[in-house]
Image (tube, grey):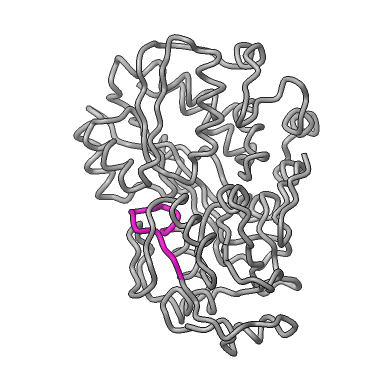
C-alpha cells in the first residue's frame, strides 16, 4: 500500500501501529484479497464481520471530512445488509447537526462536539434523552497550497494565523522566508481559501490556531469562518478544487482530499526538533493524547492542539457521529446501532488508513463499542 505523495503525504500502513492496532490488522488493511476498498467490497468478508439489523432507508448527513470514510463504510455495510438503504449527505457539520435536531436524519456527522445550545436543541428530538458525541474516525487536516517550484514548504501556527487573517499577503513575506531559508519564494499574492459552509474542519483549524498562536488568532473556534478577507468555497471538495486551480492558493482540507487531488501540503513547525509532515501516523501521535471529557454516554474528546511532541501533527480532527442516547426513532434505531457497531469495529476501522484517516485509538474505540448497544 504505497500511496506516497508530494511532501511526504504517504498513507503509511504502519500508521495504524502508532495507535497500537495489531500487525494482523495492518496486513489486512494493506491488501489481502478480502480487503474492502473505495472501488470495491468483498461481500463475503462484509457478511462475516457485520451484524445486520433493521430494514428500510437510513438517512444521515453532516461532515464532509468523513465522506470518504462513509463511502467505504456504506459500500461494505450495504453489501452485507441488503435490507438497509443508507444515504449520507456531506452537507457540512453545521448542516448535519441542524438536520439532526430538526428530526430529518437518524444521525449526524460532525467534526466538532455538540455545543450546549445544540445539545439543548437535540432534546426536542431525543425524547427523554439528548444528542451524544460518538468519536468514529480521526485524521489530519492538511495545509494545502499551490505554489509551483516550492515543493517543501514549512509553516507555523503564527504565520498561518496571519495568512488566514489577511495580514501576510505575499509568499515572499519575511515570516515565510524565515521558515524556508532555502526556498525560492515568489513575490506572488497569497490567495487564502476557507469553507463557506459551516464546517467542523473550520472549527478545528480555529482551535489549533487559538491554542498554538493565541497572540495572532483572536477569533472564536466556530464552524462558520470568522475572519475577514479570503475567499470561500463549499465543502472539502470545493476548497480542494480552488487550491488545485488557483496559483498562489492556500487552504485547509482533510488529508484524504489533499491526496486525491494531488495537492502539495506544508509541514508544520510545532517547536519540536523537526517540522512535522502531515500523515495518519503523525496525526495518531497527537490524537492518542486526547482525553474523554464528555459525561455519561457522551464521548466528546479534548484534543491537544498545542502539542510539541516529536513527530506529532497537531492540526487534526476527530469526527463524531451524533445520535440520541434515548428517544431514537423506533423505525431506524436497529439499523443505526447496527451501522455504528460496524464503523467502530476493528473491521470498520481497518479500512481507514488507505483513505488517509487515522483509526481511533483502541481504548476510545472500545468505549464507542460499549456505548452504541445502549442507545435506545
Q: Is residue 223 above or below residue 266?
A: above
Residue 215, percent from left and from top: 46, 81
**199 is within the stretch colored magenta:** yes
- Tally of numbered discs: 0
Residue 116, percent from left and from top: 28, 50
The residue range painted magenta reads 192-203
Q: Residue furthest left?
A: 124
**272 is within the stretch colored magenta:** no
**Camera-side residue: 125 or 15?**
15
Q: Is residue 284 left or right of residue 304?
A: right
- Residue at 57% across, 62% down: 144
- Residue at 24% across, 49% down: 117
Specify the quadrant of the image occupied by residue 304: bottom right
Specify the quadrant of the image occupied by residue 72: top right
Q: Is residue 324 left or right of residue 374?
A: left
Residue 58, percent from left and from top: 36, 22
Quadrant including the C terminus:
top left
- Residue at 49% across, 48% down: 301
Q: Is residue 140 above or below residue 143?
A: above
Quadrant including the N terminus:
top right
**Camera-side residue: 113 or 354?**
354
Specify the quadrant of the image occupied by residue 131: top left
Q: Residue furthest bottom?
A: 174
Q: Is residue 135 left or right of residue 234?
A: right
Residue 370, percent from left and from top: 52, 27
Amino acid at each position: 500500500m504505497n500511496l506516497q505523495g508530494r511532501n511526504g503525504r504517504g498513507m503509511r500502513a504502519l500508521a495504524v501501529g502508532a495507535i497500537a492496532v495489531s500487525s494482523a490488522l495492518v496486513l489486512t488493511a494493506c491488501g489481502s484479497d478480502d480487503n474492502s476498498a473505495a472501488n470495491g467490497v468483498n461481500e463475503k468478508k462484509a457478511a462475516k464481520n457485520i451484524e445486520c439489523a433493521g430494514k428500510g432507508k437510513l438517512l444521515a448527513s453532516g461532515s464532509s471530512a468523513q465522506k470518504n470514510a462513509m463511502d467505504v463504510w456504506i459500500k461494505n455495510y450495504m453489501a452485507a445488509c441488503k435490507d438497509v438503504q443508507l444515504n449520507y449527505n456531506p452537507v457540512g457539520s453545521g448542516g448535519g447537526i441542524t438536520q439532526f435536531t430538526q428530526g430529518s436524519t437518524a444521525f449526524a456527522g460532525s467534526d466538532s462536539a455538540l455545543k450546549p445550545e445544540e445539545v439543548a436543541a437535540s432534546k426536542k428530538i431525543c425524547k427523554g434523552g439528548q444528542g451524544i458525541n460518538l468519536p468514529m474516525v480521526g485524521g489530519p487536516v492538511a495545509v494545502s497550497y499551490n505554489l509551483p517550484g516550492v515543493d517543501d514548504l514549512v509553516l507555523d501556527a503564527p504565520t498561518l494565523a496571519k495568512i488566514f487573517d489577511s495580514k501576510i499577503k505575499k509568499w515572499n513575506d519575511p515570516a515565510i522566508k524565515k521558515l524556508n531559508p532555502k526556498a525560492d519564494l515568489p513575490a506572488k499574492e497569497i490567495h487564502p481559501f476557507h469553507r463557506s459552509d459551516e464546517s467542523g474542519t473550520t472549527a478545528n483549524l480555529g482551535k489549533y490556531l487559538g491554542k498554538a498562536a493565541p497572540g495572532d488568532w483572536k477569533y472564536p473556534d466556530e464552524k462558520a469562518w470568522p475572519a475577514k478577507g479570503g475567499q470561500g468555497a463549499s465543502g472539502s471538495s470545493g476548497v480542494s478544487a480552488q487550491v488545485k486551480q488557483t496559483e498562489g492558493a492556500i487552504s485547509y482540507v482533510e488529508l484524504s482530499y489533499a491526496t486525491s487531488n494531488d495537492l502539495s501540503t506544508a509541514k508544520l513547525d510545532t517547536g519540536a526538533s523537526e517540522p512535522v509532515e502531515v500523515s495518519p501516523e503523525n496525526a495518531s501521535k497527537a490524537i492518542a493524547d486526547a482525553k474523554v471529557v464528555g459525561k455519561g454516554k457522551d464521548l466528546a474528546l479534548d484534543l491537544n492542539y498545542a502539542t510539541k511532541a516529536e513527530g506529532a501533527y497537531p492540526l487534526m480532527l476527530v469526527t463524531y457521529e451524533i445520535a440520541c442516547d434515548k428517544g431514537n426513532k423506533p423505525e431506524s434505531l436497529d439499523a443505526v446501532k447496527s451501522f455504528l457497531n460496524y464503523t467502530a469495529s476493528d473491521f470498520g476501522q481497518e479500512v481507514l488508513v488507505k483513505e488517509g484517516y487515522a483509526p481511533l485509538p483502541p481504548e476510545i474505540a472500545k468505549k464507542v463499542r460499549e456505548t452504541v448497544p445502549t442507545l435506545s
